[in-house]
């Protein structure tokens, strides 16, 4: 858009606050996000002496810009929507559900299988949410696991896994921001200090194995268990002759070709290291992989007459239609993030706040975690958050008095960024988790918030311990123990209320 960023102080955090508060109170996300965008451009125009009409124009300019900037993401999503519908109508998903029903018989095994698959597909968070959701949704439905719980499992094994996987699009992005501290080596050192990611995986394991729930999630699970599970009626558009490999082969093709596509786009075959190549333009690689999966589906289904050519093309169009709602939310979320970062300087305002606070170095990791969590939650982007905060943390940590605290503080920055991204209703990953689980978006937000926030509260204590000990294993052990204590206290409280 070519606009100069301005400094409006605390008003820079007002647009995301408006959007989030409206979304949580009205339960209507589209208008809430749009009003957040408009409020941001209005603040900009009033501060620069421009008209209200110009504010509306800027809002749509920002949306158009973000659609262009995220073109590959949009193409990837519509192709994936098409692939999901085509695979479903081939009968492959139904056949897989029948096969899995004989092996995954209860909610615990269904949740564990979902979590395991989420951990295995660690290359990209959005890819994780949609792929795992497609495969596991029929099974979790049959095992009476709520869509809200499925969305939480998808979200909790997406970004939290990507941020601790040395080979992922996230690892490359983070390493590139840490060159002064040691690049990939520094990133590897932050992994045991990334308490939010590690404790979230512990939380997933605990709630999956014990079936212990609290808050709105407990109500969702009880409601799901009360539903009488009747035999599913097959959609007349679904083929009767589909086999398990009609699901597996296109998805495996998509995954392998997506990895190869990311490597190709990033220049791996021209000499670029693999870990660096896959992070260069991951959505372009994912697009190539999804297109390859669609081609394999075509070759697999049409000659065997699982569907006619016309039905295949109709499935593609219908699949694209399923992505319109999440894409609309994404466009608004991207625009809101753009207004905050490019016009109002929200990140700079927060970073100045961090720099201005004079606290003992031992409290730096806890402080950075809280600041990163707030900024990521408000802007809906973990990448943007650690892109802003990591240079500041390195500047503070790469001094004689801050040297020992550098790695814990960097880990805290990444952890806080992931927590905010995990919870924020305007985060890409949150939106795609809702889409993958086919769960109402704001229901996903409100049901997972207590789980994520409990883990975050434990992390704050953990980072205070890290600040004083600078020992990753003492910090991690104490944090896991504290999380278990908190869950036991919640369980005893629930038991006391029942009695």
Image (cartoon, rainbow, N blue to C red):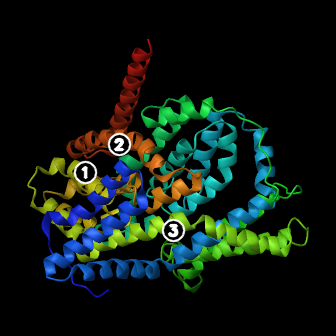
How many angstroms separate mark 1 from mark 3 (CA)?
A: 30 Å
Circle nearer the viewer, 3 or 2 = 3
Task: Of the two numbered discs 1 and 3 on the same chain, state the one appearing first in sequence.
Answer: 3
The residue identified by callout 1 is 370
| Residue at 19% from the left image edge and 52% from the top image edge | 364
| Residue at 16% from the left image edge and 76% from the top image edge | 46
Quarter of the picture containing the C terminus is top left
Give the vertical position of 499 relative to 476 (above or below). above
Q: Nearer the viewer, residue 483 or 491?
A: 491
Q: Position of residue 111 (x, y in %)?
A: 60, 40
Q: Position of residue 296 (x, y in %)?
A: 78, 72
The residue identified by callout 2 is 453
How many marks on residues?
3
| Residue at 81% from the left image edge and 70% from the top image edge | 311
| Residue at 20% from the left image edge and 58% from the top image edge | 403
Q: Position of residue 47 (x, y in %)?
A: 14, 76
The residue identified by callout 3 is 327
Secondary structure beneath dot 1 equals helix
Give the vertical position of 328 relative to 6 (above or below). above
Task: Of the two numbered discs 2 and 1 on the same chain, state the one appearing first in sequence.
Answer: 1
Task: Of the two numbered discs 3 and 2 on the same chain, state the one appearing first in sequence.
Answer: 3
Q: Nearer the viewer, residue 427 or 227?
A: 227
Give the vertical position of 456 relative to 414 (above or below). above
> Mark 1 Cα within 10 Å, few/some/many (few <14, many 20+)?
many
The answer to the question of whether label 2 and label 1 lie on touching residues, with beta carbons closer than 8 A, is no
């Amino acid at each position: 858009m070519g606009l100069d960023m301005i400094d409006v102080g605390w008003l820079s955090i007002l647009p995301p606050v408006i959007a989030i508060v409206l979304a949580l109170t009205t339960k209507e996300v589209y208008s809430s996000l749009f009003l957040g965008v408009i409020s941001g451009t209005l603040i900009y125009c009033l501060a620069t002496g421009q008209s209200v009409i110009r504010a509306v124009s800027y809002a749509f300019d920002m949306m158009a810009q973000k659609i262009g900037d995220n073109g590959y993401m949009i193409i990837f999503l519509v192709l994936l929507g098409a692939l999901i519908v085509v695979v479903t109508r081939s009968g492959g998903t139904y056949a897989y559900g029948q096969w899995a029903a004989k092996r995954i018989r209860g909610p615990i095994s269904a949740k564990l299988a979902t979590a395991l698959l989420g951990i295995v597909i660690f290359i990209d968070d959005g890819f994780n949410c949609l792929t795992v959701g497609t495969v596991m949704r029929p099974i979790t439905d049959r095992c009476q696991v709520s869509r809200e719980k499925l969305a939480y499992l998808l979200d909790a094994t997406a970004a939290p896994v990507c941020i601790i996987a040395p080979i992922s699009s996230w690892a490359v992005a983070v390493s590139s921001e840490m060159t002064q501290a040691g690049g990939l080596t520094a990133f590897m050192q932050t992994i045991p200090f990334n308490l939010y990611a590690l404790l979230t995986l512990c939380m997933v394991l605990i709630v999956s194995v014990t079936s212990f729930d609290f808050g709105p999630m407990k109500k969702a699970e009880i409601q799901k268990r009360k539903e009488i599970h009747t035999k599913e009626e097959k959609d007349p558009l679904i083929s009767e002759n589909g086999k398990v490999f009609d699901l597996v082969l296109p998805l495996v093709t998509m995954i392998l070709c997506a990895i190869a596509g990311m490597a190709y786009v990033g220049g791996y075959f021209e000499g670029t290291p693999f870990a660096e190549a896959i992070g260069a333009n991951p959505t372009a690689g994912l697009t190539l992989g999804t297109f390859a999966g669609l081609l394999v589906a075509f070759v697999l289904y049409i000659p065997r007459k699982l569907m006619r050519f016309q039905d295949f093309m109709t499935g593609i169009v219908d699949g694209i239609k399923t992505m319109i709602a999440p894409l609309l939310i994404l466009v608004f979320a991207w625009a809101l993030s753009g207004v905050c970062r490019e016009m109002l300087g929200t990140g700079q305002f927060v970073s100045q706040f961090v720099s201005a606070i004079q606290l003992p170095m031992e409290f730096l990791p806890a402080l950075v975690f809280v600041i990163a969590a707030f900024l990521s939650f408000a802007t809906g982007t973990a990448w943007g958050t650690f892109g802003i905060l990591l240079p500041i943390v390195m500047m503070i940590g790469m001094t004689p008095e801050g040297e020992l605290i550098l790695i814990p503080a960097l880990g805290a920055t990444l952890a806080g960024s992931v927590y905010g991204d995990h919870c924020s209703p305007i985060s890409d990953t949150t939106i795609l988790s809702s889409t993958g689980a086919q769960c109402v978006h704001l229901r996903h937000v409100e049901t997972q918030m207590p789980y994520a926030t409990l883990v975050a509260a434990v992390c704050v204590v953990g980072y205070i311990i890290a600040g004083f000990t600078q020992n990753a294993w003492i910090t991690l052990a104490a944090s896991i123990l504290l999380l278990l204590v908190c869950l036991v206290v919640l369980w005893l409280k629930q038991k006391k209320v029942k009695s």
